Structure formats: C-alpha cells, structure tokens
Image (tube, rainbow, N blue to C red):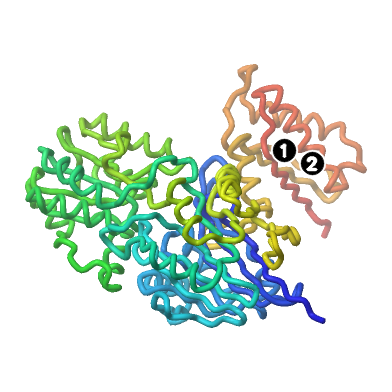
Amino acid sequence: MTVNRLIYLPLGGAGEIGMNCYVYGYGPEDGERLIVVDLGVTFPDMDSTPGVDLIMADITWLEERRDRIDAIFITHAHEDHIGALGLLWPRLKVPVYARRFTALLGKLKLEENGYPGNTITVVRPRPETVEAGPFRVQFVPVAHSIPESAALVIDTPAGRIVHSGDFKLDETPLVGEGWNPDLFREIAAERPVKALMCDSTNVFSLHPGRSESTLREPIRELIAGATGMVVATTFASNVARLRTLAEAAQAAGRSICLLGRAMKKMVAAAQEAGVLTDFPNTLSVEDALEVPRNSLMLIVTGSQGERRAASAQLSRGKYLGVQMKEGDMFLFSSKTIPGNERDVLRIMNALSEMGVDVIDDTNGLYHVSGHANRPDLEIVHGILKPAFLIPMHGEHRHLRAHARLAEARGIKAEIATNGMMIDLGGNAPEVAEYIETGRLYLDGSVMVPALGGVVRDRIRMALNGHVMVTLLLDENDEPLGEAWAELMGLPEAGKTGAALAQTIETELNDFLLRIEDRVRRDDDKLDEAIRRIVRQVSMEEIGKKPEVTVVVSRLQAE
C-alpha cells in the first residue's frame, strides 16, 4: 500500500529575511507532486558579497524534480518574493500564477530576461481556485505595503494549509484591500486548518500594528510647513505611501515629480492594474526645473541608501539637473532595513552638510510597517486555530519566538529553517529529512554558485591585495632575465622603506640562482615555491599575505 505524505520545504526565507522560496509536496516519498511559492532575491553587501548584483536560493533540488512541479505561485510583488522569477523560471519552465498587479511586474521581469510574459496566469481572489496536481490553491487578499498581496489557502488530500505571505492587520491601507477578519473566519470554518505557515518579521514588536492611514495627517502637516524644496523617499513598491506623499504635496500647492525608474514603474503598474486610480498629476524632471523651489516636491528612489538611486545621487550633488540647497527638506518615509544603516547615514550626513533639513522616522510619525506585530499574530492564531504552526519569513530568533508564541496557545509548532523538510501528515509536524541548500549569485550577467569560489577570491584580493609574478625560461629551463612583480591593492613600500615590488623581485631572483633543476622543471613546484616567497616577503614588509598569480613562460627549442 502506497503511503502519501504532505511536505513543506523552505529553500529560502526561513532563518533569514529575504530570498523567499517555499515548496509544498503531496504524494509517496520521493514521488510527491510539488508546487513552489515565491521566487525572491536578497541583496548583497560589500563586506560579504562584493560586486554581486543579486542573491537567490539555489534551486538545484527543484531542477532535479522539475517533471514533478505543477506550478509556481507568487504571493506579492516585493523583490524578496518575485525578484528571481525572470532568472530562475527558465530552469523550471512551469506555469506561474499571481494576482493582476503582481503578474504585471512579473511579466516585465520575464520579458527583460527574454522570456514570454504570458507565462504568468492572472488569478482573481478567493473563491477562484487554481488546481495544480493534488493541490487546490486560492489567493486570499491581505493588507501589506504593496498592492494586491495575498495569503494562499492550499487544500490537499491531507488537510488545509494557510500560507500567510507577508501581511498586516490594516483595515484601511489606502491602496488595495484591507484586512478582513470575517474572510479568515470563513476559511477556518469551511475546513479545519492543519498548518499555518506564518510571517514572523515583527514578532518582537509588542504593540498592535498601525494603519497606513494614520500617516496622512502627520505627513500633510510636515509638507505644509516646509519653506524650501521638499524631497521624500520611500520604498518604490509602497504605492499607498507614494499616494499619501503626493496628496500631501498637492494639498500644500506643490507640483510633484517622480525621480527613479522603479518609482515610475510601480505607479504605472498600479494604474494599469486598476489599484491606483486617483494619483495626482506629475511633472517631468525638465518641467520640474522650471517650478519655483518652494512650490516643488520630488518623490525619489533610494530609501535604503542604494548608491545609484536618486537619493544618493542628490546627496552627492546634482541629479538630472536638480540640486538640493540650504533650507530644503528631505524626508525618509521608511524604515532602514538592518544592514543598510551605514549607507543611509552617509546620505543623511551629506545632505546635512548642504544645509538640508533631514527628517527620518525616529518618532514613528512618517512610516508604518507592512508586517503584523505580535498582538496581530495572536489574533490570526486565534481566528484560524491551526493544528500546527510553522513560522517563516524571519531570522532564527524570530522563528523561535513565534514558535513559542504559538505553543503558549496550545498550537504545535516546529522551527523549520532553509533545507529542513517537514512532514505535515501526522499528528505533529516532524522533520522528514535535510536538503542541501545554498545560494546563487547574479554576478554581472552570469549566475554563479556561492560556493564556486568567485566571490571568495574577490574578498581575499580585497582584503590582502594581489601580486602577479612573471618569469621567462629558455629551452633549458634557465631564466631569461629576471622575474618581475606587479602589485595591485598593496602599498608601494614596506617597513624597510624599500619598494615592495623590488624587494620581492630581489628575493625571487636570488631563489632562481640557487633553485634545484627538478623544481625549475616542475611547473607545480615552481609555482608553489614562488608563491611562498612572495607571501613571506610581503608578510615581513607589510604584514599581509596577498593573493599571488604566477605566470611562467617557457621557450621551446626549434
């Protein structure tokens, strides 16, 4: 008799915030039919991933089972949930389902990478149902900081799963649907919820979450009191915030200009999807330059300190002809994501040096989170009454705190980090097996595995510098001239005061005079010996062991 199992496997997004990718399966062991929820990215930093453009989950496990995947479902259009779609879909090539606004942005990502946008099927919210193998999936509207976000109700022969996606309990989010508790009561009454996979981002926030609508008046008052030009930045995807900022500018009699490709793309997509129907008129940057400073407001990209975004460009001087001056105001209507603090502070300080008044969210007036706080999570637990809770979308400390919160209510919980396959079929969630997981890097236009060594070597060169040694040998393996060394990222002189390259060359040429024939004729031994000498000299002179490249050219006898 064949025994079927119901499994849950996070490949990204569990034990970290970002790079979301989750797998559900139902069927016999190692023969389950599979669905994927979200294909997101996370972003690099110069300390651990220098030069990398994007980071995403390694989907090798999925690729090896591509013939068993029935669909991909995208919960919403934030980059950490949809950002890898155009890069990873070609490796899976299965149907994709999303709501209209999300589908529009996903279509652009696919087309930018040369793939057909009609791969994505637009799905209306519950009760419309998508059948994918043994799964029946409904999109349930939830409030978040981007329009048309959705939780997923996933019905299987082994029970009902609710995958929360990212959400908050906001009944008046200004753009998109609000939180509807009756809808979730209906879901729980219709069929018992076996497992809730739930957003854990704000589990440490002990006060109830605030509505997006609470920002309207504070932002309006702030803009009304400004005397110079006003510039505001927020997440480009937060369409409701963009509208609040634009309406505040309009109320103050200011013309509005959007700066940044992402900002314009989000507004256009929201208008095309029909979720943004009353956005104030905007000016081109050329027309904005003709408007008096005290009658202008710019809404710009770069709330997280991104070096090439409009905020950073303005902090360095002119951007598209626009320049900030003393008496202007710059508003960060956003929360700084952990890890971005240094870049954001750099912009703030540069603006301050110009005499610009910088306003951030220190007092909580100008930003609210898009994620449910602890009291909100408890409300959802109480409404859905799941048999199991698996926390997701959080670092390990978030997952652990969320699991304890559920267990305090008598809900069985399991902490599942990336690569932990959980069997949901029994009376309690159990770890079925561990899957090897990893990361993929988009490095320029090429995808490279995190463990491939490319970035590791780049970090080593950044930390220790690089020396290239070139040596020419004749047909008898005797040196033709002297070895020479070229330095990159190293001081010109060491502690003795002599030129470092010259000191290295002197040691190498002394070595070549006394070298044994067997070493000189063996490329590997010669390479190793030269590397050792370069590192020894460098360590003595400058206290570092650089990366070394050895180029040996041998002349061939005619």
What amino acid is at disc 2?
Pro
Give the labeled residue for mark 2: 479
Seen in the picture, residue 101 relative to 507 is either above or below; the reply is below
Quadrant location of the N terminus? bottom right
What amino acid is at disc 1?
Ala
Question: Is residue 21 toward the left or the right of residue 219 in the image?
Answer: right
Q: Tell me residue 284's x, y (percent).
A: 17, 60
Q: Tell me residue 295's x, y (percent).
A: 8, 47
Q: Is residue 321 visible?
A: no
Name the residue at the top extreme: 496
Query: Mark 2 and mark 1: span between their CA atoms?
Result: 8 Å
Question: Is residue 12 toward the left or the right of residue 208 in the image?
Answer: right
Q: Tell me residue 111's x, y (percent).
A: 43, 74
CB under 8 Å between callouts 2 and 1? Answer: yes
Give the labeled residue for mark 1: 483
Residue 295 numbered tag: none
Between 21 and 213, the residue placed more toward the observer is 213
The residue positioned 49% from the left and 70% from the top of the image is: 189
Q: Nearer the viewer, mark 2 or mark 1?
A: 1
Between 410 and 530, the residue placed more toward the observer is 410
The residue positioned 23% from the left and 40% from the top of the image is: 330
Quadrant location of the C terminus? bottom right
The residue positioned 16% from the left and 46% from the top of the image is: 220
Q: Secondary structure at mark 2?
A: loop
Between 319 and 430, the residue placed more toward the observer is 430
Image quarter of residue 170: bottom left
Q: Secondary structure at mark 1?
A: loop
